[in-house]
Amino acid sequence: MKQFEAFKLDSANGCLYRDGEPIDLPPKPFAVLNFLVENPGRLITHDELLDKLWPETFVQPQVLRTYVLELRKVLGDEAGNPRFIQTLPKRGYRFVASVTNSQEVISVSASGAAQSSAQAPHPASPGFVNRTNELALLRSEFDRIGQGDQGKRRVVFIIGEAGIGKTALVDFFCRQLPAGTVVARGECVSGVGAREEYYPVNEALGHLCTSTAAEEWCRILARMAPAWLAHIGRQSEPPQPSSAQPTAQARMPGDLCAALEEISRTRPLVLVFEDLHWADAATLNLLAALARRRAPARLLVLATFRPHSIVPAHPLRALKHDMLFHKLCTEVALEPFPRAAVASLIMGELHQSALPPGLSEFVHHHSEGNPLFAIAIVEHLIAQQILVSAGQNGAAHYEIRSPLHNLSSEVPGKLAEMVELEIERLAPDVKELLEAGSLLSVAFPAWAVAAAVDCDHAEVEERCDALARDLHFVERVGEDELPGGARSAFYVFAHEVYREVLYQNQSAARRAQRHVRIAERLAQLFKGREADVAREMAMHYEAAGEMKRAAQALRAAAAHAAERNAHFEAVELNDRAAQIESQV
Ligand SMILES: Nc1ncnc2c1ncn2[C@@H]1O[C@H](COP(=O)(O)OP(=O)(O)O)[C@@H](O)[C@H]1O
Ligand SMILES: [Mg+2]
């Protein structure tokens, strides 16, 4: 019997249990889960799953997706933040939770590895290459945060250009942390979401409050930082203060720092803040406060950013200098991949252990060792049918069909230009959908794309699904339930660079028109629950330059919140409206 978190899997009898209670699971999804649990921590490609499970039968690869969706539902897992099954776009799946067998820990986990970082080196993970020194440094920083009341906080800045591998490094490192480590991750976003104060902090708190020991963390936050909890919608209303009006300032950074220190008393806490070049000032202040406080805390903060995306006067620059000067942080600057690492990366992408002569040199030379750029070049070569699969029986084996040097002048010198080239070759109606998707931060739902391009929702969803199947840089990650019960799938770009290029691709007038349509659709969909989406509507109106409508949306939502006695929310929405009105 294998165990992971509250689940037990009895493969001999084909049963899955949660907390000892049997769970109904049809045989095929069960077989998929069983295979993944038997092979924890390893990338299982679609082909391997299909070959091993149904060697005699033809099963459509898309069907796997349905089984995994079903498994995620049963396990309470999320594709965007996997506790059990991680999707590796276009490649396959990996079971990322700790699996135990009669008390024996046999695998690594998403939130904690079986081995301590001080123990034997981790087995190489398929898919992750290079970065040995950087991983060693991160592990030694983790070891330095210490034990119990002696805890010592550490901040590590991981810097490098877009696509160099900051996120990949942090994700890989976090997957290998010792069991029991709490990881909370917040991503700064560009686009409409960037206007929200404390966006990444809220996201990280949201993670904490949905993690395995969520109840315990929520209790600590409720006691020590109630306003923060209220802000992420985990607590309906803080107690109504008798004299002072509740305002947005009720979220004191000190309260949150103290609560995080308290959480780190029982378990090491790793906070990840991604893409700080887009962080709001409040988030940066909070980070400074976290770094400077003296109380014991077993806290490791990993913060990534692109140094070339911040202007000299950017507060992040001063913050980092100050922290380096006071020895409060360490910096890891990610270098380009050497040729051998580019070769390994391509082998991983193509699922083959040897490469046609000259390919890795060509890709390394043109990408200058940037892994995202390298992947985009390989995808380009495949799209141009220069790199062609000559495999038999479904096994991929790529060969070069025309001399690569003829192509040299065609490969642009910059990552963004390479991405532009990839996008240019798409049909206009495909580009239109993707451009609409780029108007949203983080993930884009089919209903919003449908609104932006003024098309039928179901049809757009089908077309987006096709995109997610065909394009390496779009992935379907889940489904939302809309008011009224309809469902809408949502998608992400594999990397922010794709969103940025697509966003810039549109004329300002076209963007504005589409933002307004999304805001209007939000109002329609959430009629009667405007407060829930007011901020989002206002962001779209603001992005369209429609400040009056942005403020109106917030005022209407504030009135609606007040009717529901949600005073805290009403004050905040009115504050935000006043801010926007003052800019008009
Ligand atoms: N060490 C690595 N091993 C394998 N692939 C990597 C590695 N680093 C980056 N990549 C690939 O490059 C892409 C871009 O890397 P990412 O970490 O998202 O860049 P960044 O966060 O610096 O913008 C990833 O999606 C991944 O496919
Ligand atoms: Mg990143």
Image: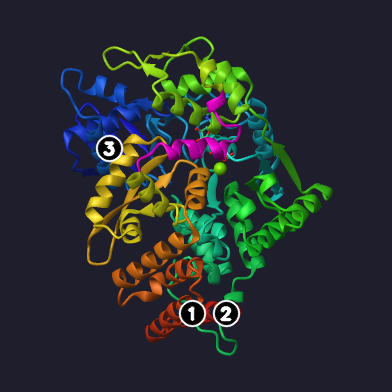
Looking at the image, residue 15 sits to the left or right of residue 398; the answer is left
Residue 352, by quadrant, is top left
Q: How many marks?
A: 3
Q: Residue furthest top?
A: 357
The residue mark sitting in front, 1 or 3, is 1
Name which residue lies at 43% across and 60% down.
510
Magenta segment: does it hold 411? yes
Q: Which residue is mark 3?
A: 65
* Quadrant position of the N terminus in the picture: top left
- Kind of element beneath mark 1: helix
Question: Residue 138 at what x, y percent from top left?
Answer: 65, 36
> In the image, which residues are magenta?
409-427
Q: Which residue is mark 2?
A: 584
Looking at the image, residue 495 sits to the left or right of residue 19; the answer is right
The amino acid type of the residue labelled 1 equals: Lys
- Kind of element beneath mark 3: helix
Q: Residue 170 or 416: which is nearer the viewer?
A: 416
Judged by its main secondary structure, the magenta piece is: helix
Q: Which mark is residue 98?
A: none
Q: Which mark is residue 548?
A: 1
The answer to whether 306 is drawn above or below residue 322 in the figure is above
Name which residue lies at 54% across and 52% down.
187
Instruction: Give the spatial CA distance, label 1 vs label 3.
Output: 44 Å
